[in-house]
Image (spheres, rainbow, N blue to C red):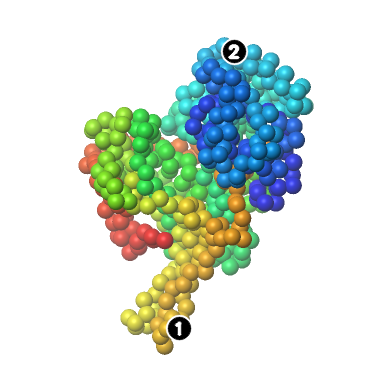
Amino acid sequence: MEFLNQQHQVSEPSIMVIFGGTGDLTHRKLIPALYNLAFDQLMPDHFAIVSIGRRNKTTEEYRDELKVALEKYSRNKISESQWERLRDIIYYYQLDFTATEGYDALATFLNGLDERHQTLGNRIFYLAVAPEYFETIVNGLGKSGQASCHYITGEQCPNWQRLVIEKPFGKDLKTAKHLNDSLHAYFAENDIYRIDHYLGKDMIQNIMVLRFANLVFESLWSNQYIDNIQISLGEKLGVGSRGGYYEHSGAIRDMVQNHILQILSMVAMEPPVALTTEAIRQEKLKVIQAITPFTTDSLRDNVVFGQYGAGTVDGEKVPGYREESNVPETSTTETFVAMKLSVNNFRWAGTPFYIRTGKRLAGSSAEIVVQFKSLPNILYFADDKNHQEPNLLVIRIQPNVGVYFQVNTKDFSTQKDIMPVKVETSHLSPNQGNTPEAYERLIYDIMRGDATLFAWWNEVEASWKLADQIISFRENQRHRFPNYSAGTNGPIKSIELLARDGREWWSV
């Protein structure tokens, strides 16, 4: 699982087939990630990339387009020699993947590349397309004999076929189950990689290292010493041109059901018996299943919905959500949600987990704040002179990647005063180097067959059961939207959610 420890493990030969090869995700994330893996010498010696699109263009034209994208989005400067090497293994294949025909011809084309590049019939099928095309593409692959060989024949196969799915994985539990059944008709669960780019970020992977490689943290990692845990994922940006998508998603489907619950499960999980995919997944699943189910009363008391109105961000006036493109004037879709969750197990009973996520907030950041319990108000805190600040462990996911631990120490400019100070590390410091981005880590794991950082079906199912409760409650409420201005920290009720417990959101 740990990226740096795997750099000398060689990925197996394969062809990566990208459906949606002309799309934004491919140009901004996937091809730059593949280039940087090649730059860092983590690409298999025998490898090829086939980008599939519906537009009529040649491979040479497509390669030229990718060169422009790389110069704009790659974290490493483009080396001409390295680019030439990558360029020679990139192919463009025109196919209307929304139709049922043409997949047999695609199989023949890929088999030909196997001989040219000695890729042994191994495949990575990456579905970088809209969710409504997932089932059609998988059916096409399955019926043309390109799906999980061992799964279909029941025999040992000399090669493998892996399917990579971007979120959203369904829009509720019912549709997620239908999609999952469609995938399982042709691909084994172990061959399905449901990608969540947040799990590829440095600090998400570092959660387990901080806990299980430091006695000082793991020995305190429970309700006995931790007062509360906060997970905040906020954006300054609005929905922009994605209004049509967001209308059918909202903050719960877009962020809570996947990113936030995955992060929460890693923060709260028990130590796994081993650093294997199966062991880690089992412990994450137990956390999600242990979250106390909502009742009508607890939904009303512990969940806050919001929608941004017009406001000012970075000195510029911006429109409200209902004024964005492809958004109805009376939309009740939430662009913000905050909630209090309880993990009902021995380790966490009584320790609240506060989560919030939203668009058009005062700043863009993603962080986890672990607030430890305070000491008794005696000795140094016996009077009002010294205000006691709690110890905080802050895990900054983005944009300033790093960790800091807040402790109380003497203020050396005075005789007696006590002040909080931060013991901090950062991945932006010079000695950390040019760290890999999330998609590089995840694609590298796919090449190696390591599914640790990918959601499996049981996690997705458990997450949707919880999310469906919240969505159903939200749809049955009468909302006074908008209820927060762009450029603020969200609805007032989200502040009151913690204030009634005698707590506050940490701005770090």
- Sequence-wise, which precedes: disc 2 or disc 1? 2
- On the rendered structure, is 38 left or right of 504? right
Spot occupied by residue 312 in the image (x, y as percentages of width and height): 27, 48
Q: To which residue does mark 2 refer? A: 102
In this picture, is 348 found above or below 147? below
Q: Nearer the viewer, residue 234 or 155?
A: 234
Q: Residue furthest top?
A: 101
Few, some or many residues within 10 Å of mark 2 (<14, 14–19, 20+): some
Residue at figure coordinates x 35%, y 29% from the top left:
244
Q: Are marks 2 and 1 in contact (CB under 8 Å)?
A: no
In this view of the protein, can residue 235 be seen by the observer? yes
Secondary element under disc 2, as helix, strand or loop, is: loop
Residue at figure coordinates x 33%, y 46% from the top left:
360
Q: To which residue does mark 1 refer? A: 412
Secondary element under disc 1, as helix, strand or loop, is: loop
Spot occupied by residue 398 in the image (x, y as percentages of width and height): 48, 52
The amino acid sitting under disc 2 is Gly
Question: Quadrant of residue 419 in the image?
Answer: bottom left
The amino acid sitting under disc 1 is Phe
- On the rendered structure, is 312 left or right of 201? left
Spot occupied by residue 341 in the image (x, y as percentages of width and height): 41, 51
Residue at figure coordinates x 63%, y 52% from the top left:
272
- On the rendered structure, is 145 left or right of 264? right
Question: Quadrant of residue 127 in the image?
Answer: top right
Spot occupied by residue 45 in the image (x, y as percentages of width and height): 75, 35
